Amino acid sequence: MLTTSFKTLFWQNFDSIRAGAQFFHVNPVTVKRWLNEEIPINPMAEKLLIIKAIGYLPNDIRWQGFRIDEERAIFITPTGRQFAPKELEEWVHKRDEYYLLVERHGHIDWPKIAPAKATLLPFRGGRRMSAAPWIPTKEKTRR
């Protein structure tokens, strides 16, 4: 990946150098050096940035236009339809119902478009689960 492409994708996905450094698990000075072309960009950082930029979906023509909104935890199709994770689990059952209803009654000309259901945050014991701290292996204490 060219440095200009990396810079463009970086600023499209992160508001600050600190946010990017936290995502890549490096120091902010490392990201500054990547952006200023002082050191070569880590190939794994390039791959992570591409994955984040395309919304965690495979870089394949069949997935082109599909996105994932991390904050709302929804899947967005190229036409703008939105699905929550729980709705996708129910999809096979709904598809079977749909085909049976079409067989019996025919197609509906203009179906009503419903927004995605709200996705609840994970809770355990009445409080929100916190993420485990990430500790680099070189900083772990040996027992």
Image (cartoon, rainbow, N blue to C red):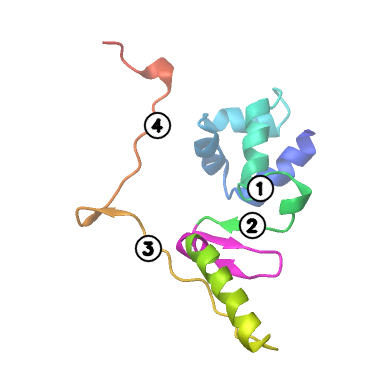
**Vertical position of residue 31 compared to residue 121: above or below:** above
Q: Distance between the residues labelled 2 and 4?
A: 27 Å
Give the mark toward the camera: 1 or 3: 3
Percent coordinates x, y for residue 86 in the rendering? 45, 62
3 vs 73, nearest the viewer:
73
Q: Distance between the residues labelled 1 and 3?
A: 24 Å
* Label 1: how many Cα within 10 Å (few below 14, some 14–19, many 20+): some
Residue closest to the far left: 125
Dot label at residue 120: 3
Q: Mark 1 points at which residue?
A: 53
User: Does residue 76 show up magenta in the picture?
Assistant: yes
Q: Residue at x 62, y 75 (%)?
A: 99
Q: Which of the pair 105/67 is nearer the observer?
A: 105
Q: Residue at x 63, y 31 (%)?
A: 45
Of the numbered discs 1 and 4, the one sitting upstream in the chain is 1
Which one is closest to the eye, mark 2 or mark 4? 2
Q: Distance between the residues labelled 2 and 3?
A: 20 Å
* Residue 106 colored in magenta in the image: no
Q: Which residue is the site of mark 2?
A: 67
Examine the image and state in which quarter residue 50 appears. top right
Report helix, strand or loop for mark 3: loop
Give the mark nearest the N terminus, 2 or 1: 1
Q: Is residue 49 above or below residue 29?
A: below
Residue at point 51%, 71% (across, down): 116
Residue type for callout 1:
Ala
Magenta segment: 71-88
Q: Earlier in the sequence, mark 3 or mark 4?
A: 3
Between 32 and 102, the residue placed more toward the observer is: 102
